[in-house]
Structures are given as C-alpha cells and as structure tokens.
Image (cartoon, rainbow, N blue to C red):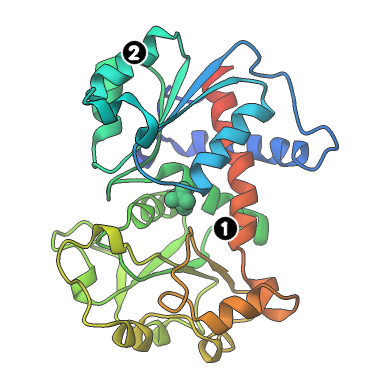
Amino acid sequence: MLSGKSIIGIDDLKKEDIDLIINSADSFIEVLDRKVKKVPTLRGNTVASLFFEPSTRTKNSFEIAAKRLSADLINFSASSSSLKKGESVIDTINTIMGIKVNLFIIRHPEAGACKLISDFTGMPIINAGDGAHEHPTQALLDLYTIKRNFKKIEGLKVAIVGDIINSRVARSNVKLFKKMGIETTLVSPTMLLPENNEYMGLEIKNSISEVIDKVDVLYMLRMQLERQDRKMYPSIEEYNKFLSLNTSRFFCLKKGCIVMHPGPVNRGIEISEELMDLADKNGEVAKKFKIKQQVTNGVAVRMALLYLILS
Ligand code: CP
C-alpha cells in the first residue's frame, strides 16, 4: 500500500512508496511483452482521465495502463466537452463523480488545479501535469528508466538541461532524484531559472559543454514555448550555442551515459534534427537515446500506480 491515496506531487511519496512503485512496475513491464497484454486486477473499477490540456504520451499511457488492468475508463477531453458550453471545471468534476468513478487522473494548465480538485472531492487523484508545478508520474517513469539502465542509482550524476523555470518535469525530477540519492546539476541560463531560491543547493551551469563529458544521464527538457508569456531567451541560435544537444556534443558524452527527454522534442531546439534522425536508426546513437524506452516504461509505472492506489 502507498502511504497516501493521491499523487499530487513528489512530496506525497515516501522513499518506501517510491521503492514499491518501482518494484511493482517491474512486475507490470513483463505483462506488456505478453501475447495477451491484459490482467483482471482492476476489474470493476472506473478511472476518469480528465485532460484540460493537450497530451500524447501521458494521456495514452494512462489510458492503456487502465485498460491493461481491466479497469473501465472515462476519457474526457476538454475540447469536446460541455466546458465549451460554459460548464465550470468544478461542475464538470461533480458530474463525473455522479457517474461513480474510483479515481481521477487530471492534467490541467493551471498550477495547483489537482490539489484544488483533490480538496474539493476527497477522491484519489493522480496529477498528470498541472501548469508549471509538477508532473510526478513523468518523474517516476524517468527514475524507472534510469533504474533499468544502471545497476545502482545512488550517486549517479544527472544534468537537467534547458527551460527550468517553466518545467513541471524538472520540478518533480529534482525532488525525486534528491530522495533517491541521485546528484542533479541544472544547466540553464539565469533567464530560464526561477528567481526564488527553489533550487538552492544544486549545482548550476550555464552551458551544456560544462557537463557533457561528466554525467551519467543527460536529461534534455522541452522548451515550453506555450508557457512563455515573455520572451525568455534571445534566439534559437543562442539556445543552440549553449543548451542544445547536437551530433558533435553527442560524441563527447561519457561512456555509458544515456540521453533522456520527456517529449515532445522540439527538433532543432533541444536536440538537433541531424541527431534525432541518427537516433531513429540503429547504432551507437540509438543505444544511448532512451526516449522511446521512457514511453514504454511509463505504461508499466502508471499500471503500478493505478494498481497500488485502487487494489
Ligand atoms: N511527457 C509528457 O507529458 O508528454 P505529453 O504532453 O505528450 O503527455
């Protein structure tokens, strides 16, 4: 059992919870390789997946995770709902509670929305990303991916590169990595870092070149173009010069280093077009790129979360 029934942020998880999630994901990853990829574990449960913001990976991953566990699923998309006719979010949630669901999965563009809905409903809630606040299930699948690629995770060195200020993924990963004894360096110019002391104590570098040959995991963040209400960085050329992973930098990576990205990749910004094309082919580049493995692992981790909360 997990210590809480909701996962709004990484602070909701104790070290024992994280170990339990990772160990359970290990059992479920095996189900995904079976000919019949389904178990009856959550038969009779209903999961409501409410996405008020676009998503490819998280939405489909939760959907297939629920189906693999035989749960019934309500797949709500804001763009085709009565929100368009003026219904409020709270009235929408109330309506779906009337259908008698067991758990909400919620993505919302506003930071704090999941906590608000959790307080209002008292229901189990999994945060699938709320504004620039947190994306805890992404962090858990990232940790699981790291665990599957290294014998020991304690003491590993991770660099998180890019648009830190707007990134809920960075926020959740920094907290989770700290709990697990992973050393994190942030690579970002001052203008893409929060002005408060949220990341005090972490090593900060301004250029990817300073960490490229030193880290075990190079975690490239997506440039959050949709969250930049002011011009945060002078130009793409400038971004490429200091923050992007390109082919020549790739070949400076430490032996055994893996490259991760939460997706979707802005080709030509975080990672060059040329390197992305190389990563689609077999060989040395593909071996280090774990972006597809992150997606696969995400299903197992989300199956583990649904199972541990509902069963
Ligand atoms: N990583 C992630 O959250 O991607 P989506 O926006 O496609 O769900």
Q: Residue at x 76, y 36 (%)?
A: 31
Residue at the spot of label 1: 153
Q: Give the x, y percent position of residue 10.
A: 38, 41
User: Image quadrant for the N terminus?
Assistant: top right
Q: Amino acid at mark 1?
A: Ile
Crowd rating for badge 1 (residues with CA inside 10 Å; few <14, some 14–19, many 20+) = some
User: Could you tell me which quadrant the C terminus lies in?
Assistant: top right
Q: Position of residue 233 (x, y in %)?
A: 22, 77
Q: Which residue is mark 2?
A: 95
Q: Residue furthest bottom?
A: 248
Residue 199 in which image quadrant? bottom left
Q: Position of residue 116 (x, y in %)?
A: 23, 27
Q: CA distance from mark 1 to mark 2?
A: 44 Å
Q: Quadrant of residue 151?
A: bottom right
- Give the residue at x 37% y 80%: 243
Three-letter code for the amino acid on which mark 2 is drawn: Thr
**Mark 1 touches mark 2? (CB < 8 Å):** no
In front of the other: 73 or 243: 73
Task: Give the mark nearest the N terminus, 1 or 2.
Answer: 2
* Secondary structure category for the residue under label 1: loop
Would residue 279 be found to the left or right of residue 212 on screen? right
In the image, which is nearer the foreground, mark 1 or mark 2?
2
Q: Is residue 1 visible?
A: no
Q: Is residue 193 visible?
A: yes
| Beta carbon of the mark 1 residue lies under 8 A of ligand 1 | no
Query: Residue 80 or 76: which is nearer the viewer?
Result: 80
- Residue at 46% across, 55% down: 181
Q: Is residue 109 depicted above or below 117 in this figure?
A: below
